[in-house]
Image: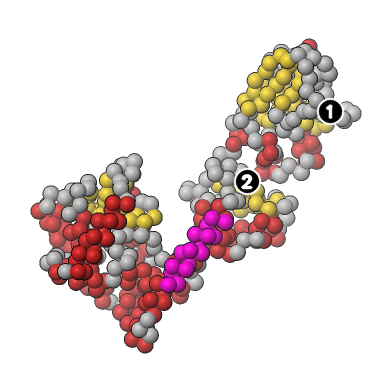
């Protein structure tokens, strides 16, 4: 009974720390998930059971569904099922386990999205965690992969990561919980089953303390991943916008910090080396990011590092400005403010993108100069060059905003017209 009390107490304590508007339980019909369902039934919380029937094992798959359905019906629990003929998706090849995972998580997400705050409970346990470690290591996975799953990583809650399979089976026997064994788990056709049925039992026989060693390593890796993620996040803007990371800053990152950096802006680690290889190329070389998940569209090689171009530039919205008449000129001038002679302004002021052929007469220069040449002289990168704005009146350019001011309309005495640009990041220009 001590094991039963410990499992029930720790389960309740964990749920008390993770409140949600609604809970969803991924229930397969196996021992682990049926124990979780039984424990959750004792909680006064709104929840729904989700079950996926891949139809891979014929009547056996249907019997798994029937077990879960009957339990839910008998206990008044909402039950949702996805029936998917997975074998049809594999006719042209593919990885069964990866495809199955993609299908079920898409199914789960359709329900999670129905609530402002929802949690999906998964019955992964300590043995799964250990298997993941060895599989990740043999695949050459990074620290995060070998660190394993977290108990809570929104919106996923895994309440059994500190419980072994044997403990859950013992609890199920004690509480007389019915479950179904998936006989495909006994087949060594799949890599996970080879680890589960052959390699790990032999490891534990030869090295009895190996599981404890793996657990210690995973705790260390988790701490390291958290540290690396914090370090790399310092280089990423809080809201999605174009930004640059210098070659020097990149040189200070270790390989895992670079992976965590990319992960935080939803760029796959499969591009990690390709993006770094940009540094060896010419300025202006770029990689297009084909990712719906990322807010970034392109990575450019610039003179001093890498430039990450967002899908929606902050400067894609015309700069907003206001005007007022002032009675004195300041001693110092900044990019965000202009001081103009109202008598030299023709008509109304407005903002537009610069165009090929645009010319202005910058302060300090004899004659006129093409806007394109000004941007080129200032080494404005191609990734943002076409996204610049000019302030104009009805006959001329008043300013290449953030870069140059035209001498034809500037004020040399007061009163004068003050133009103030708002919500524009001049430091990024």
Q: Earlier in the sequence, mark 1 or mark 2?
A: 2
Magenta run includes residue 224:
yes
Outermost residue on the bottom side: it is 206
Q: Is residue 12 above or below residue 114?
A: below
At which x and y percent is residue 86? 29, 61
The 10 Å Cα crowd at callout 1, few under 14, some 14 to 19, many 20 or more, is some
At which x and y percent is residue 82? 24, 53
Assign the N terminus to one quadrant of the image.
Answer: bottom left
- Residue at (36, 60) in percent of width and height: 151
Closest to the observer: 319 or 389? 319
- How far apart marks 1 and 2 lie (CA) works out to 29 Å
Instruction: Specify whether residue 257 is in view.
Output: yes
Q: Which residue is mark 2?
A: 243
Closest to the observer: 82 or 48? 48
Q: Is residue 421 above or below residue 53?
A: above
The boundaries of the magenta stretch are 216-231
At which x and y percent is residue 168? 23, 68
* Callout 2: SS: strand
Magenta run includes residue 148:
no
- Residue at (76, 38) in percent of width and height: 375
Q: Which residue is mark 1?
A: 363
Q: Is residue 94 above or below residue 340?
A: below
Is residue 171 rendered to the left or right of residue 96?
left
- Residue at (60, 51) in percent of width and height: 235
Image quadrant where residue 399 sits? top right
């Amino acid at each position: 009974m001590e094991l039963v009390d410990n499992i029930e107490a720790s389960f309740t304590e964990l749920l008390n720390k993770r409140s949600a508007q609604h809970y969803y339980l991924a229930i397969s019909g196996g021992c682990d998930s049926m124990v979780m369902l039984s424990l959750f039934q004792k909680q006064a919380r709104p929840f729904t059971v989700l079950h996926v029937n891949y139809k891979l094992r014929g009547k056996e798959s249907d019997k798994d569904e029937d077990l879960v359905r009957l339990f839910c019906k008998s206990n008044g629990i909402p039950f949702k099922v996805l029936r998917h003929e997975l074998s049809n998706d594999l006719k042209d090849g593919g990885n069964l386990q990866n495809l199955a995972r993609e299908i079920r998580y898409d199914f789960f997400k359709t329900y999670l999205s129905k609530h402002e705050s929802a949690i999906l409970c998964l019955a992964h346990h300590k043995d799964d965690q250990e298997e993941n470690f060895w599989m990740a290591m043999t695949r050459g996975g990074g620290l995060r992969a070998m660190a394993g799953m977290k108990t809570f990583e929104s919106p996923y809650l895994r309440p059994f990561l500190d419980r072994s399979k044997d403990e859950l089976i013992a609890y199920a026997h004690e509480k007389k919980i019915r479950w179904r064994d998936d006989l495909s788990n006994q087949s060594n056709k799949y890599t996970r089953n080879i680890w589960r049925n052959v390699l790990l039992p032999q490891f534990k026989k030869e090295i009895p303390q190996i599981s404890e060693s793996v657990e210690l390593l995973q705790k260390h890796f988790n701490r390291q991943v958290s540290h690396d993620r914090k370090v790399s996040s310092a280089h990423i803007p809080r809201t999605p916008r174009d930004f640059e990371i210098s070659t020097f800053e990149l040189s200070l990152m270790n390989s895992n910090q670079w992976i965590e950096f990319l992960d935080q802006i939803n760029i796959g680690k499969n591009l990690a080396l390709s993006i770094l290889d940009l540094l060896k190329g010419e300025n202006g070389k770029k990689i297009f990011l084909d990712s719906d998940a990322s807010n970034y569209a392109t990575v450019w090689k610039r003179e001093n590092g890498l430039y990450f171009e967002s899908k929606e530039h902050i400067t894609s919205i015309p700069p907003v400005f206001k005007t007022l008449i002032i009675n004195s000129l300041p001693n110092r001038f900044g990019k965000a403010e202009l001081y103009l002679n109202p008598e030299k302004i023709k008509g109304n002021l407005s903002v537009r993108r610069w165009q090929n052929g645009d010319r202005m007469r910058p302060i300090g220069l004899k004659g006129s100069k093409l806007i394109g040449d000004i941007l080129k002289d200032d080494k404005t990168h191609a990734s943002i060059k076409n996204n610049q704005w000019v302030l104009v009146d009805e006959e001329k350019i008043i300013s290449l905003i953030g870069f140059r001011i035209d001498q034809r309309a500037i004020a040399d005495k007061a009163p004068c017209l003050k133009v103030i640009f708002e919500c524009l990041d001049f430091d990024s220009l």
